[in-house]
Every structure is written in C-alpha cells, then in structure tokens.
Amino acid sequence: LGSDDNQFETSMANSGCEVHRFDPSIKSAHIQEGRHLWYHRLSIDWRDPNPAIAAHKLHSNTKKLGTIMNEFGHQKIDVLKADVESAEWKILENLILEDVVEQIGQLVFEVHIHWPGFEVSGNDSTVVRYWYSLLRELELKDFRLFHTYKDLSKPQMFLKKEAFNASSCYTLSWVNTRWK
C-alpha cells in the first residue's frame, strides 16, 4: 500500500509469495505482473463507502481491509506493508476494532506525526494519547515491535512544531507472536 518503491513487493513475489498491491492511481482495475504480483485500483480506508452518499461515490475505490479480504477470499495476511499518507491511525483503529489485525502476521506501517491525521482531532495531548492507545492495543493483542526506522529526509516536525533530531515520519515493524 502506498509508496512508489515496490522493490519489497517485487522481491516477495519473485520468492513465490502471493502479493497484492493497492494503488488507486493505476489505470486498470486489476493488473497481474508475473505469476505472483497483482496491482489493484483500490486503496485501504477505515470505512467502506456508502453508495447512497454522493461524496462517497467519488471515492468508491476505497474499502476497509476486512472487506477486501472477504472479497478476495483471503483468511490471513502474512505481511501487511502500508504507507497510507496520514490515514494510518484511523486504518489501524479499524483493523483493531474489527479484529482484522489478528489475521496479520507482520505489520509494517509508516506513521506520520507532523499532524494528527485524518479525522483525528483534539489538543496535542489528546492526539498523542490516541496514538499511544492504538500502539498499546497492538501490544495487548500480542504484537511486538521488532524494528523502527526514522526517516531523516522528512521534516523534523511533531504535531506542526519543529522538533530537533526527530522526524515527521517513522516506519514501525510489528510481529504477531500468536501467528499460526
């Protein structure tokens, strides 16, 4: 999901893994590249579109991950890599609330902390508590953080304030210790 660098996905597919990449900007609804790599004109969201609401019709290529898994007939995801450009907090909340996260073996996602994110509001303390509650919930579901990456090429900002030796973008990698 996200990011123009598909080296990880290509490498996984070349190793024999079934890989689905979601990108709402591709021209065709579905493209198969090789035996194991598919591109889909979709993006993951924290809500399914409501076709009765005109504004949602414009974004009908967005769906919740659980909905996509059901449509594809998938019961689990070995590795979910996501860069969803500031929608990650609401998507993570949805994955936790709907127990989809328990169907994921490894979760690698990019978080943006230069602003609260889509539909996340409140003062700085409230936003940080919300972010923390989601990360804590992952731990309570037996996910363990095994790697972090601080992208120093991004602005050094935290909730719209400059922050020395920080980054506005981190990649967090989690493993589900209950994975079977």
Image (cartoon, rainbow, N blue to C red):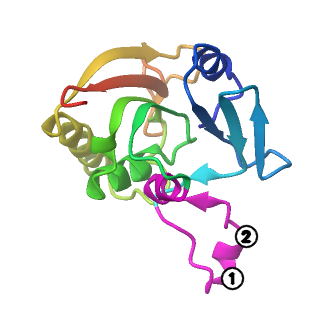
- Report x, y in % for residue 24: 72, 49
In what element is the residue under mark 2? Answer: loop
Q: Is residue 9 left or right of residue 117?
A: right
Residue behind mark 2: 58
Marks 2 & 1, CB-CB < 8 Å contact: yes
Amino acid type assigned to the residue bearing label 2 in the image: Leu
Q: Is residue 97 left or right of residue 112?
A: left
- The span from disc 2 to disc 1 (Cα, nearest Å) is 7 Å
Residue at x 59% of width, y 37% of height: 1
Q: Which residues are magenta?
A: 47-71
Q: Which numbered marker is on residue 54?
A: 1
Amino acid type assigned to the residue bearing label 1 in the image: Ala
- Report x, y in % for residue 160: 48, 39
Q: Is residue 57 magenta?
A: yes
Residue at x 75% of width, y 25% of height: 34
Q: Nearer the viewer, residue 180 or 146?
A: 180
Residue at x 32% of width, y 48% of height: 127
